[in-house]
Amino acid sequence: MKWTEVEEIAIQLSDAHPEVDPTKVNFVDLMNWVLALPEFNDDPARCGERILEGIQQAWIDELA
């Protein structure tokens, strides 16, 4: 899984952290949680604030 797969990342984060409100997650934790996903295998250096915002929004949308 790559950084560009924001919807799939959001689904997996929702499954891995069901108790978490994604609107309250800081980007450092969010990035670390993405990197810890078993199927994630992209370069951490390719991640930026814009990508993390997209993942966070997709996670919020996933719970709506």
Image: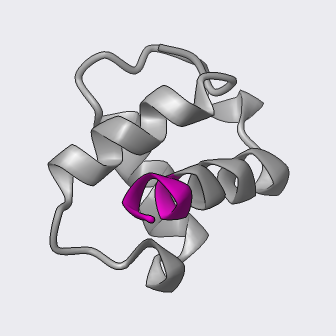
Q: Quadrant of the C terminus?
A: bottom left
Closest to the observer, 8 or 38: 8
In the image, 8: left or right of 14? Answer: right
Which quadrant of the view contains residue 56? bottom right
Q: Position of residue 1 (x, y in %)?
A: 47, 14
Q: Main secondary structure of the magenta part?
A: helix
Q: Position of residue 25 (x, y in %)?
A: 46, 77
Q: Position of residue 61 (x, y in %)?
A: 54, 58
Residue positioned 58% across, 50% down in the render: 58
Q: Residue furthest front?
A: 64
Residue positioned 40% across, 36% down in the render: 35
Residue 37 higher or lower than 57, as above or below: above
In the image, 21: left or right of 15? Answer: right
Residue positioned 64% across, 59% down in the render: 57
Residue positioned 41% across, 51% down in the render: 32
Residue 8 higher or lower than 32, as above or below: above
Q: Which residues are magenta?
A: 59-64
Q: Is residue 30 magenta?
A: no
The color scheme shown is one colour
Residue 48 higher or lower than 39, as above or below: below
Which quadrant of the view contains residue 63? bottom left
